[in-house]
Amino acid sequence: MHRVPPALTRLALILALLAVWELATRLTSVNVILIAPPSIVLWEIVRVFAGLSVPDFYLNAGITLAEIAVAYAIAAVFGVLMGIAVASSKVIGDAFEPILLVLYAIPKIILYPVIVLMIGTGYASKISFGILVGIFVIIFNTAAGLRQVEPNYVRLAHSLGYGKGKIFFKVELPAAAQTILSGLRLGFGYTIIGVITGELLVVNVGLGFLIDWASVNYHTAQLYAVVLITLAIGVVANLVVSRLERRWVR
Amino acid sequence: MAIIEVTGVSKTYHDQSSGRAVRTLDNVSISAPENDFLILLGPSGCGKSTLLNIIAGLTSFDDDGGRVLVQGKPVTGPNPKLMAYMFQDPVLYPWRTVLKNVEFGLEAQGISKDERRERALKYLRLVGLEEFAHAYPRQLSGGMAQRVAICRSLALETDIVLMDEPFAALDEQSRILIGDELVSIWRQVRRTIVFVTHSLTEAVYLGQRIALFSARPGRIKLEIANPLPRPRSIGTAEFNQMVDTLWTQLKAESLASIKREPAEQEKILLPKE
């Protein structure tokens, strides 16, 4: 017997789920305000992209994407640099790592009101929160990756006459690349969560605003549509980063 | 004149946590003439690898009058233009192809891309791995990986090659075959090889001269020439006799090193006062 390819099984599962969902909403007396059937949601997604559904979809989606891009760029650059600093200097590591670990462990959301009070309700607060949620895993993965480099990798380069700087770029960084890149991938997901959480907590613009708008107005189909679009952005982003990760690490 | 000259070198390690001082080498003197294949043989923990590391400039030694001269100059650090150093493990970088791994040492010396490639391929050909030039290390067996590591050392084309139990991780058959390859390369491209091992068979099979270490603190107990003609074969009467001679000398030292180990572990386990 041939084995069924997993992609096909997955597709079948999703289709079955959608069918049950559709039938359940059609055949029972569940209010469409509470659960919208997939057929309507699908149509709503088309309408969203046509600009006929939620207010200023492209503007709001653009704002969210821009916030994510800025937040992630900052989280990635500073996260990697801080990870390098923590791993390469015992003084910096011993001084800062406990603080970072505490910050990492607490639920970041309790800091959001503080951020809003400090820098207001604009884009900056959402970007800051995205950075705060995303940066730690990047710092820790970078530091862990660099610390786990085989001592012999470094000894070999040393014996071949390489200096400290060259050893870092030619040996330690490539050896740690896999761990650093998976930190960057996870950090990307967390940054997206941070930015959208920020938008949902202080509602004024972005996809978070659209989700909230649809929710409080009982536009259930719109709500589902925007949530699915947001999800899709997350999935696509993750796919792109994983692809890059695989290309760099063979 | 000897290309390597070690005179009165001692090495003491200071254990930071227990404050104990461990003397691994005690007043060791040894020299190697050009084109020698010198074996450093001894029980585990006798400091033979430490001595190799000291010659390589990777480890410091006690400042009590000892001297290490290579080509007449004191060793101050790794000198990859003069000495290639080979580890017990192949230590290939998994993100580099075989070719790029062999070229790695040459890159440090700023040798042009074409020449790097040419030299790397020359040695890969010598060990029969040319067709794996563009493979990645994970695609190689243990023996193949170690041959790539040999290429990386030899490609430096240094006068001296220092090898720290380079075949210890291989199975016996691979070890013999790769040993044959090393000897045939050594005879083609004359180099001075210093080779650390704890295997009697390997010592007799490969070595031109054999220096036997005492148990810790390591001293050189005996230096003998190995007159067996090449190619050698394991198991002949002369071969076995050579092994026997070495074993008679080594046995007491091995016993001493084995007896010492449990006692030392106990010491470490004792709580600090």
Image (tube, rainbow, N blue to C red):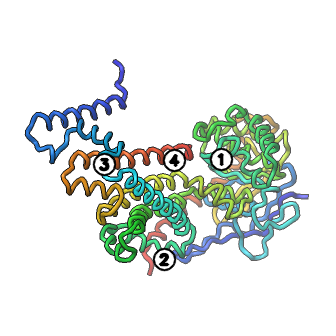
* Quadrant assignment, res B220: bottom right
Labels 3 and 4 share a subunit: yes
Q: Secondary structure at mark 3?
A: helix
Q: Are marks 4 and 1 on the same chain?
A: no
Q: Viewer-proximal residue, B269 or B189?
A: B189
Dot 2 or dot 4, earlier in sequence: 2
**Other residues around mark 2 within 10 Å, as few (<14) / some (14–19) / many (≥20):** few
- Earlier residue among tags 3 and 2: 2
Instruction: Tell me, yes or no, if residue B48 can be seen here.
Output: no
Mark yes or no: residue B212 visible.
yes
Location of mark 3 (residue): A226
Mark 2 — residue? A95
Where is residue A2 shown, x and y percent of the image? 36, 20
Mark 2 vs mark 4, CA separation in Å: 31 Å
- Which of discs 3 and 2 lies nearer the camera? The answer is 3
B80 left or right, relative to A106 = right
The residue where tag 4 is placed is A245
**Towards the viewer: A69 or B206:** A69
**Chain of the residue on which disc 3 is drawn:** A
Which chain is mark 2 on? A
Residue at the right extreme of this rendering: B1
Kindly indicate whether the residues beneath marks 1 and 2 are on one polypeptide chain.
no
Q: Quadrant of residue A199?
A: bottom left
**Who's the residue at 48% across and 63% down the image?**
A75
> Mark 3 and mark 1 in contact (Cβ < 8 Å)?
no
Q: Is residue A94 left or right of residue A226?
A: right
CB within 8 Å, label 2 to label 4:
no
Tell whether label 2 touches label 1 (CB within 8 Å).
no
Which quadrant would the C terminus of chain A be assigned to in this image? top right
The tag on residue B199 is 1
Mark 1: which amino acid? Ser
Which type of secondary structure does the marked residue at label 4 adopt?
Answer: helix
